[in-house]
Amino acid sequence: MKRLFLALAGIVSTIPGITVWQSGLGTPPDKSLLFGGVVEAFGALSLMLLWVNRTKIRSLTKSRVTKLSACLILLCFVLLSVYVWLFGLTVVKHDFRGTAYYPLWTSGDLVTMVKSADNSRYTAIEKYGIDEVNEAIHKMPNSSLAITTIILLLVYQAVFSTLIVAFGILGIHEESEL
């Protein structure tokens, strides 16, 4: 079992980042390299932190390790839920007109467009067209999309990091010598 947990930690720390690089899975438009790279970097960092703290992890009781891993897995699902919600709010794909990457909050022309479209970002694309919506997005302060990307990135990488640490703690606790 110990090798299985360590293998899962290793897989979770490498495969998602590579998959994101190649496919853009669950990332905002044109952000797959950034998100994939961050997932890879934080995955490696998580494994290194586990390795550095392996003696302390091995000294934990089985009950403590079980509770800690269960909490991390629960946190992973909570973070995944938050990410799916944030992604749905910010990345709006219209079936025929294209995809818009909205900031978490709207201002200026964009807020007027969304409000006049029944407070629906999707309907704003339908009513005004993707080009006009994107133009309104780009008229907003640059910090709007930058902060949105940072928040999405933090939550996205935390989904994977919590899973890596959960599997890693279980594997290291059971492993007498790595």
Image (cartoon, rainbow, N blue to C red):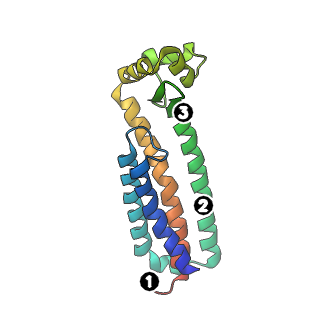
Residue 83 visible, this orientation: yes
Of the residues tagged 3 and 2, which is closer to the observer? 3
Residue farthest toward the front in the current orientation of the protein: 96
* SS at mark 1 in the image: loop
Q: What residue type is labelled 3?
A: Leu
Residue 142 percent location from the top left of the image: 34, 28
Residue 55: give x, y in percent of width and height: 46, 80
Measuring 51% from the left and 31% from the top, which residue is drawn there?
93
Q: How far apart are marks 1 and 3 (CA)?
A: 44 Å
Q: Left of 58 or right of it: where is 61?
A: right
Please indicate whether residue 129 sits to the left or right of residue 70 in the image.
Answer: left
Residue visible at 44% across and 55% down in the picture: 19
Q: What residue type is labelled 1?
A: Leu
**Contact between labelled residues 2 and 1, with CB atoms less than 8 Å apart:** no
Relative to 16, is 98 above or below?
Answer: above
Left or right position of 67 against 151: right
Residue at the disc numbered 1: 178
Q: Do the residues labelled 3 and 2 touch (CB within 8 Å)?
A: no
* Residue on which the image places disc 3: 89
Q: What residue type is labelled 2?
A: Ile
Q: Quadrant of the C terminus?
A: bottom left
Q: Is residue 28 above or below residue 159?
A: above
Residue labelled with disc 2: 73
Is 101 placed above or below 45 here?
A: above
